[in-house]
Image (tube, helix red, strand yellow):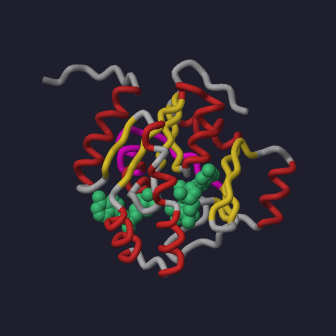
């Protein structure tokens, strides 16, 4: 396991699928110069996804081999596919930035909290069930996948009270504005007062 240095912080975005975790994390993360740690998965890429950008797409055999080599800090199964984060990637992202972020389901969020305690900031992003369903339909997810994701909705939502910050993502610009302000409080960027 990577040992955190001095002021290094890990931000974990969690919440129900389709809530906009990835969208808001990327917008606030890039504004604040944070780096994302990309997970490995055995899930096949969607048409719009790129290897190394959205996920590292690997075969089940490659995943099992990496697991046997003890490369993952955390592994989770979602819809029969494996997902995991490599400790070496956490280390290499910290070489580029003092703060990193990940987008994980509640099990990954719980594991990182256990491993790194209060150096992990849990950020819960959600929207109501109807909005999620509508967003998933608009992004072209098939009916059976939408039904599966919605079946996890209540379980993911119950994790909200264990998170440090909660954002209902209705209006994207407002969410990103509020989120960026919140993250900035953790980053000690020593800004000069420009007023
Ligand atoms: N615990 C854990 N969860 C992950 C990891 N990588 C991705 N996830 C989450 O697991 C779920 C994967 O579902 P998927 O159908 O691939 O959704 P997508 O990533 O939003 O397209 C999402 O909620 C991800 O945020 C990981 O390495 N560990
Ligand atoms: N506030 C919002 N209003 C409308 N659509 C949104 C909003 N935030 C995100 N979306 C859209 O919802 C879909 C799911 O967002 P995504 O960031 O992939 O969710 P998650 O990572 O939580 O699964 C995407 O098509 C995204 O463009």
Is 138 displayed left or right of 115 in the figure? Answer: left
Is 77 displayed left or right of 144 in the figure? Answer: right
Q: Residue at x 29, y 23 (%)?
A: 191
Is 52 displayed left or right of 25 in the figure? Answer: right
Q: Does residue 85 sit above or below 4 in this rendering?
A: below
x%, y% of residue 75? Answer: 70, 50
Q: Residue at x 53, y 75 (%)?
A: 145
Q: Does residue 88 sit above or below 9 in this rendering?
A: below
Q: Residue at x 78, y 66 (%)?
A: 60
| Front residue (pair 116, 51) | 116
> Residue 37 magenta-drawn?
yes
Q: Is residue 53 visible?
A: no
Q: Quadrant of ligand 1?
A: bottom right
> Residue 65 magenta-drawn?
no
x%, y% of residue 66? Answer: 81, 52
Q: Residue at x 28, y 48 (%)?
A: 175
Magenta span: 26-39
| Front residue (pair 105, 41) | 105
Q: Does residue 94 sit above or below 37 in this rendering?
A: above
Q: Quadrant of residue 161?
A: top left
x%, y% of residue 126? Answer: 37, 53
């Amino acid at each position: 396991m990577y040992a955190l240095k001095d002021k290094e912080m890990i931000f974990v975005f969690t919440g129900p699928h389709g809530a906009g975790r990835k969208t808001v994390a990327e917008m606030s993360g890039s504004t604040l110069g944070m780096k994302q740690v990309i997970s490995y998965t055995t899930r096949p890429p969607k048409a719009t996804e790129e290897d190394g950008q959205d996920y590292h797409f690997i075969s089940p055999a490659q995943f099992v081999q990496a697991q046997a080599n003890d490369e993952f800090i955390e592994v989770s199964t979602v819809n029969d596919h494996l997902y995991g984060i490599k400790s070496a990637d956490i280390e290499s992202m910290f070489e580029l930035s003092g703060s990193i972020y990940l987008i994980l389901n509640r099990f990954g969020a719980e594991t990182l909290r256990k491993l790194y305690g209060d150096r992990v900031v849990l950020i819960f992003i959600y929207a109501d069930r109807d909005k999620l369903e509508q967003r998933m339909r608009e992004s072209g997810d098939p009916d059976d996948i939408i039904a599966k994701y919605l079946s996890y909705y209540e379980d993911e939502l119950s994790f909200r009270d264990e998170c440090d910050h909660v954002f209902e993502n209705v209006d994207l610009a407002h969410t990103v504005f509020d989120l960026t302000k919140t993250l900035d409080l953790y980053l000690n960027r020593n800004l000069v007062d420009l007023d």
